[in-house]
């Protein structure tokens, strides 16, 4: 299994541009999430999905859209990039095990908005 | 609202010495607690978790953590640090029925030779 894959690894955008960060998992996990990591702030939840066709907002959803048309894919769309969205983005998938959810993280996408 | 605090931005320890990375949480109900490690330019790797049962949890790479309900703490420990343990460590909390995590800000562990 490839696990959780993310593309691209690096991206530079200009303010106002839009783009989609791709995330895919081949473990048939029902749950997927997007987090952003900023220095001194840990990881913060952007959006998550509990199954195909079901998504919900996390702690910092503004400026981002998601959809989940298949179990495998969970793309994150930046509608109009802003410098405040410069960050490292991690996608995670999870399944329920022993009463909790085992989270598997992708390698991340480093985004710079100029 | 649930929250996780990691009071130390950085922990310095000499190789061979014991290490502790602190984590406290503020939640209502019974939390699920996790530790993750991040090496430079890498994703997060799972170390260990506490769900229920024995308060001392053993995880990967010789790490362990102790759940203390009265002090609302879940400190990460290792008896003998290695230089290769140098990394960024995150404590996280979740609850039964929730598939997402709330993370602390992270603690950089630096182990000197």
Image (spheres, coloured by chain):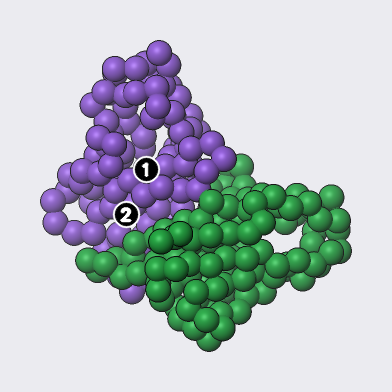
Near mark 2 (Cα within 10 A), the count class, few <14, some 14-19 or many ≥20, is: many
Residue named by callout 2: B33
Q: Is residue A67 above or below residue A77?
A: below
Residue B7 at x, y = what percent?
44, 37
Mark seen at residue A106:
none
Quadrant position of residue A29: bottom left
Residue A9 at x, y = what percent?
65, 51
Residue B45 at x, y = what percent?
41, 47
Shown in purple, the chain is B
| Mark whose residue sits in front, 1 or 2 | 2
Q: Is residue A56 above or below residue B84?
A: below
**Residue at x-position 24% and y-position 39%:** B64
B60 left or right of A89?
left
Near mark 1 (Cα within 10 A), the count class, few <14, some 14-19 or many ≥20, is: many
- Chain letter of disc 2 in the image: B
Give whichever of A7, B91 is nearer the camera.
A7
Q: Is residue B87 above or below residue A102?
A: above
Which color was chain A given? Answer: green
- Chain letter of disc 1 in the image: B
Residue named by callout 1: B23
Q: Is disc 1 in contact with disc 2, using a CB cutoff of under 8 Å?
A: yes
């Amino acid at each position: 299994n490839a696990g959780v894959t993310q593309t691209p690894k690096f991206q530079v955008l200009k303010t106002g541009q839009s783009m989609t960060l791709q995330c895919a998992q081949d473990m048939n996990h029902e749950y997927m999430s997007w987090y952003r990591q900023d220095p001194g702030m840990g990881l913060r939840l952007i959006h998550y999905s509990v199954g195909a066709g079901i998504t919900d907002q996390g702690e910092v959803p503004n400026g981002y859209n998601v959809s989940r048309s298949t179990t495998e894919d969970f793309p994150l769309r930046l509608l109009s990039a802003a410098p405040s969205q410069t960050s490292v983005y991690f996608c995670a998938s999870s399944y329920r095990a022993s009463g909790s959810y085992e989270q598997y993280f992708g390698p991340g996408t480093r985004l710079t908005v100029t | 609202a649930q929250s996780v605090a990691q009071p130390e931005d950085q922990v310095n320890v000499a190789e061979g010495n014991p290490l502790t990375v602190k984590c406290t949480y503020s939640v209502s109900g019974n939390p699920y607690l996790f530790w993750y490690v991040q090496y430079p330019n890498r994703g997060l790797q799972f170390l260990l978790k506490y769900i229920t049962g024995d308060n001392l949890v053993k995880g990967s790479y010789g790490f362990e953590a102790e759940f203390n309900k009265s002090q609302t703490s879940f400190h990460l420990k290792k008896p003998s640090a290695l230089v290769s343990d140098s990394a960024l460590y995150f404590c996280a909390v979740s609850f039964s029925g929730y598939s997402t995590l709330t993370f602390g800000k992270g603690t950089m562990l630096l182990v000197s030779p």
